[in-house]
Image (tube, helix red, strand yellow):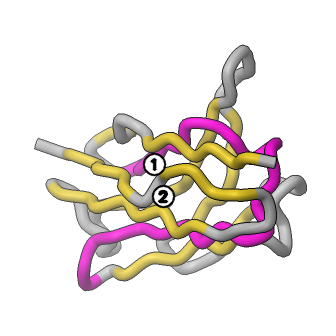
């Protein structure tokens, strides 16, 4: 059973920081399982959008709107994905979802709410 569980969301003031975590179980970062993992977000009334990706070889990709402010990282030993978010603003308010693309399928977490107050 594959599970992705996000945590770390919350309410933060504009300019503040948060770190999101995504604990994966049932899949691993080794070469036989996960191709890439990523963070996506969905704001009210908007489509889900890519925030950041990290591939099996460590290559990272960021949405233009978060470049220089957000950092995606993984701890393969702990099977955990992170998203460090700095200089948050109201446009970053959304539900953030963890995604894993693997040899056994594509999986989503339940999401964690991030609210940035101005």
For residue 114, above or below residue 19: above
Q: Residue at x 81, y 53 (%)?
A: 89
Q: From this viewpoint, which residue is outermost toward the right? A: 64
Would you identify the image quadrant in which residue 78 lies? bottom left
Measure how far apart labels 1 and 2 are at the Cα level.
7 Å
Q: Residues within 10 Å of mark 2 (few under 14, many from 20)?
A: many
At a point 37% along the width and 59% down the height, the residue shown is 22
Query: Magenta span has 84?
Result: yes
- Residue drawn at x 72%, y 15% is 45
Q: Nearer the viewer, residue 26 or 56?
A: 26
Say the numbered circle drawn on residue 88.
none
Look at the numbered disc 1 and give the secondary structure of its residue.
strand
Quadrant in the picture for the N terminus? top left
Q: Is residue 97 left or right of residue 52?
A: left
Disc 1 to disc 2: CB gap under 8 Å: yes
Identify the magenta region: 77-102
Q: Secondary structure at mark 2?
A: strand
Residue sitting at x 33%, y 70%: 80
- In this rendering, does residue 107 appear at all? no
Total tally of numbered discs in the picture: 2
- Percent across and percent down for residue 40 are 60, 44
Query: Residue 36, percent across and down?
Result: 49, 60
Q: Which mark is residue 37?
A: 2
Q: Residues within 10 Å of mark 1 (few under 14, many from 20)?
A: many
Q: Earlier in the sequence, mark 1 or mark 2?
A: 2
Q: Nearer the viewer, mark 1 or mark 2?
A: 1
* Horizontal relation, residue 104 to residue 88: left or right: left
Q: Which residue is mark 1?
A: 98
Q: Is residue 6 left or right of residue 35?
A: left
Q: Nearer the viewer, residue 42 or 57?
A: 42
């Amino acid at each position: 059973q594959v599970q992705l569980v996000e945590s770390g969301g919350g309410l933060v003031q504009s300019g503040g920081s948060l770190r999101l975590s995504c604990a994966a179980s049932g899949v691993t970062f080794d070469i036989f399982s996960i191709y890439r993992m990523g963070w996506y977000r969905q704001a009210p009334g908007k489509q889900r959008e890519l925030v950041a990706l990290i591939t099996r070889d460590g290559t990272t990709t960021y949405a233009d709107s978060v470049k220089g402010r957000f950092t995606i990282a993984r701890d393969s030993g702990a099977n955990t994905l992170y998203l460090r978010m700095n200089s948050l603003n109201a446009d970053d308010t959304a539900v953030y979802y963890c995604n894993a693309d693997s040899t056994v399928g594509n999986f989503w977490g339940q999401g964690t709410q991030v609210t940035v107050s101005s």
